[in-house]
Image (spheres, helix red, strand yellow):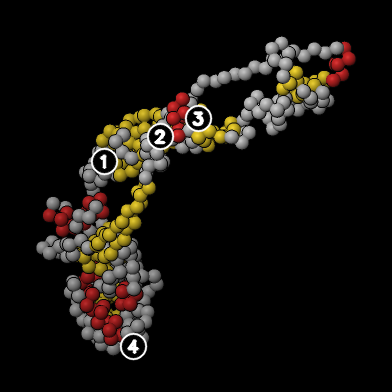
Amino acid sequence: MKKISICLCIALMFSNHAFSQIQVDSVGNVGVGTATPSAKLDVDGVIKATGGNSTDWNNKLDAEVDADTTNELQLLNLSGDTIFISNGNFIVIPNLNVLTTLNCSVSSSLSNTDETFSGAKDGSITVSSTCTGFCGTIQYSIIGGAVQTSNIFTGLAPGTYTIVATNDGIACSDTNMVTILAGPPPTVQQRLDTAETPLALFNTGIQLDSLYGKTYQGGLICYLDTLTGDGLIAALSDIPNSKRWHNGTGIVTGATDLSIGAGQSNTASIISVQGGGIYAATECTGFTSGIYTDWFLPSRAELNTMYVNLHSEGLGSFNPTLYWSSSEVNNSSAHTQDFFNGSFPSRLKGDNLRVRPCRAFSPVPPSCSISSSAGKTDETFSGFNDGSITVTASCTGSCGT
């Protein structure tokens, strides 16, 4: 930026009698016509310039002294595309073309995180930037991509990226390059987290003991039928506090099936006969984990998959005590499993025991439907790259983020 310096040289001549009108204070401020100077040169009165211009000058910016409005010093203030002048006038500069001549300097550095695992496309780049001189809002872009005000880029696949940090997208910029490295092969958990089913993993050679205890659809995998792909999930933790099996009435419910796959129908039978209240079956059907609400009290065989495939392997945070199953013995008792030694004692339905909800899954991922609409704002003016798009979306079915 070109700088223009204006020097007003004034020769001041004083007679011997005039020195009483000059005051120099302890910090070096000089006062002319004032005994209390508040600046390096503080003049109270009119300054008269001779030897080229006999016009009287006054340094006050807010007063007109000679009826000529073109010879006062002015304060300038820049806002957006407008220069405001202290006398009330202003100048509008379309497209901010003047900014290309203003002096500024942007410097930036990059930090990045590589892809978590192969195929994740979750690398990120963070830009740290500073600006000196004429500085507006720093904007960022990957060459070939949209301009943004955020200094963080996410969801990046492996590759080399060129990042541009720009002052208002026009005046000055800095460019840097960084490489996102490909991640290692995904773990079993990472593959489950990216929507591969347990059966699909098993069919690629993943062993059952590598699947059990992995988080999936709201809990821990505790059983997989390797022919059908159906399986069972144990909740991550027990229902708080021990619960009784019935709602206070010892009657036959017909929930006698012990087998894998029977827990959901057993639970429905129990609630149908027992009715409302707070007891083991209703605590399970009222349980929620994430988006999953289809939990039930496991049958005796389903409960055993939790003991064998989770608890015996140190997984699932179970207590070494008795847990209720949904399998009924008679009107007064039901089957339990002792998570201390694996035995299956029956206990009175009125006893308060631990409860762990269970749910089933199939090889077909849960379905969902997403609908969306988009709104936009156009570019403010050519070359500014400040358009935006806003997406409004809704989801029905099994919806995550």
Instruction: Tell me if I can see residue 311 in this picture.
Output: no
- Residue drawn at x 31%, y 77% is 281
What distance separates the C-alpha of mark 3 from that of mark 4? 81 Å
Q: Which quadrant holds residue 266?
A: bottom left
The residue where tag 1 is placed is 157
The residue where tag 2 is placed is 169
Identity of the residue furthest to the right in this view: 17
The three-letter amino acid code for the residue at tag 3 is: Phe
The residue where tag 4 is placed is 249
> Which element carries disc 4, helix, strand or loop?
loop
Q: Is residue 355 above or below residue 380?
A: below
The residue where tag 3 is placed is 134
Choose the circle earlier in sequence order: 3 or 2: 3
Choose the circle earlier in sequence order: 3 or 1: 3
What distance separates the C-alpha of mark 1 from that of mark 4? 60 Å
**How many residues crowd around disc 2 within 10 Å: few (fewer than 14), some, or many (20 or more)?**
many
The three-letter amino acid code for the residue at tag 1 is: Ala
Choose the circle earlier in sequence order: 1 or 4: 1
- Residue drawn at x 87%, y 19% is 20
